[in-house]
Image: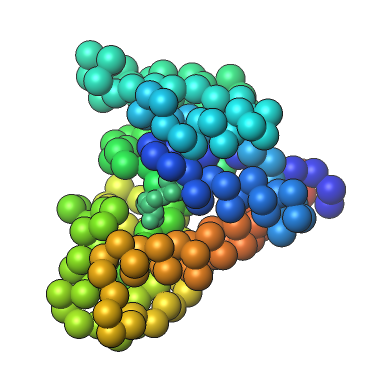
Amino acid sequence: MNKQLNLAVLVSGGGTNLQALIDAEKSGILKSGKIKLVISNTKGAYALTRAENNSIKTLTLDKKEFVSRERFEEALISALDFNEIDIIVLAGFMSILSADFVKKYDKRIINVHPSLIPSFCGVGFYGLKVHEKALEKGVKVTGATVHFVNEIADDGEIIMQKAVNVRKNDTPEILQKRVMKLAEWKILPKALEKVCYNLLKLKEISK
Ligand code: GRF
């Protein structure tokens, strides 16, 4: 089995998780999939520069420039089809996809969330908010989760999780950085490799 699946990474911001995937591809941790396309819903996102620096094709689809979410998702689907994408990775992608879109790519969209699901997740739990809430609650352990995406926010099957200790003087910013470094950047590439490997195996069997 030496084939690779085509991956699209959807981003909105700095793209440190995308960078972790690019690095994993280079080091061989990610070998059953290849990043073919990076799509940003924010113009000028630094994630796009990271992709360009690594000769990965990029596309910006700004939802505000479409008359409706349906038109935005049609454009998204066209780009995914055209590039023959097998797996979609949401890596710091700050937009909710419709139930129809998610159903079309059942078990083929994965997301990284900066908490141990089912804690501190769901609608409204994104970015720093997740870490603010974890500190407010006084949890001693938090972490990150990679999961399949279904039509309910942060509800899909869990693929991988990693715990991170909270320290006494943590601020949301400090905790966010530690969770990214110790958990998100580690488990996202590993979970993606696992998903790609399993899907490739399934494709082989059903040939
Ligand atoms: C990360 O915490 C990710 O889990 C969240 O957005 C943050 C920034 O990600 N969804 P990135 O640096 O753009 O990858």
- Give the vertical position of 102 relative to 39 (above or below): below
> Residue 7 versus residue 48: which sits nearer the camera?
48
Quick check: can you spot residue 181? Answer: yes
Q: How many marks?
A: 0
Quarter-wise, where is residue 167 in the image? bottom left
Residue at horizontal 48%, vertical 68%? 183
Q: Position of residue 192 (x, y in %)?
A: 59, 55
- Give the vertical position of 108 relative to 147 (above or below): above
Residue extending farthest to the front is 169
Q: In what quadrant of the picture does the C terminus appear?
A: top right
> Residue 150 versus residue 146: which sits nearer the camera?
146
> Residue 128 versus residue 124: which sits nearer the camera?
128
Q: Position of residue 193 (x, y in %)?
A: 65, 57
Residue at horizontal 49%, vertical 37%? 47
Q: Is residue 79 left or right of residue 101?
A: right
Q: Position of residue 163 (x, y in %)?
A: 43, 78
Q: How is the image coloured?
A: rainbow
Residue at horizontal 57%, vertical 36%? 50
Q: Position of residue 35 (x, y in %)?
A: 64, 38
Residue extending farthest to the right is 2
- Give the vertical position of 205 relative to 37 (above or below): below
Residue at horizontal 54%, vertical 31%? 49
Quick check: can you spot residue 6? Answer: no
Quarter-wise, where is residue 118 in the image? bottom left
Quarter-wise, where is residue 154 in the image? bottom left
- Give the vertical position of 94 relative to 179 (above or below): above
